[in-house]
Amino acid sequence: MPSDAYRLFAWAIENHVPLRCRYKGMVRELCPITLGTDDKGEVAHVWVTGGAFSGPLPAWRTFRLENVTGTRPREGEWQSGRSKGDRAPTITVDYDANRESPYAPTHSLGELRGAPQPSDS
C-alpha cells in the first residue's frame, strides 16, 4: 500500500502542484517529476527549487520517500529542469509529470487530477 507521501507526490505530479517538505529533516521546495519504486521502496525524482541545499539551485535529486515528512502543496509555478538525456530512470515509473512520458508509467495520467489532496502525516 502506498505511503501518504507517495499519494501526495502522485497527486502533485498529476496536477502540476509544487510541494514543500522535509527531506532528512531539511526543508525542501520541489516539483516531483517521476514517481515509482525500486527494490528498496518508494522513490521520486524531483526538481528542487528552494529550501536548505548544499549546492546550486535548481537541481535534480532523487528522494527516498521514507525520508520525506511534512509534505504540503505550496504556491508557485510548476518547474522542471532540462532532461538528463536518454537515460531511463532507475525506478519502475508509476507516474511521470511529462504528459508524453517515454517511461510507460504504470498509472494512467489524469487519474488523480482534481482529486482532493491527500493528507500527509
Image (cartoon, grey):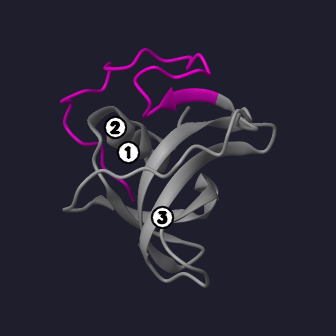
2 or 76, which is in the foreground? Answer: 76
Mark 1 and 2 residues: CB-CB less than 8 Å, in contact?
Answer: yes
Callout 1: SS: helix
Camera-side mark, 1 or 3: 3
Q: Residue at x 48, y 68 (%)?
A: 58
Give how far across and how far down residue 99 sits, in percent: 40, 23
Task: Please tell me whether mark 2 sits on a helix, a strand or a loop.
Answer: helix
| Left or right of residue 114: residue 105 | right
Decide: is 32 above or below 100.
below
Secondary structure mostly seen in magenta is loop
Magenta stretch containing residue 94, yes or no? yes
On the image, the x and y values in percent for residue 62 come to 64, 55
Residue labelled with disc 2: 11
- Residue 41, relative to residue 62: is it above or below? above
Q: Of the residues tagged 3 and 2, which is closer to the observer?
A: 3
Is 92 situated above or below 63? above
Q: Which residue is mark 3?
A: 48
Q: Residues within 10 Å of mark 1 (few under 14, many from 20)?
A: many
Residue 24 pos. (x, y %) = 60, 74
Label 1 sits on what residue type? Leu
Q: Which mark is residue 73?
A: none
Cα distance in 3D space between marks 1 and 2: 5 Å
User: What is the magenta range?
Assistant: 93-121
Label disc, if present, on residue 8 of the rendered structure: 1
Q: Quadrant of residue 63?
A: bottom right
How far apart are the two marked residues, 1 and 3, measured between alpha carbons? 16 Å
Left or right position of 83 against 111: right
Label 3 sits on a secondary structure element that is strand
Q: Residue 7 occupies which quadrant of the picture?
A: top left
For the N terminus, the quadrant is: top right
Q: Amino acid at mark 3?
A: Val
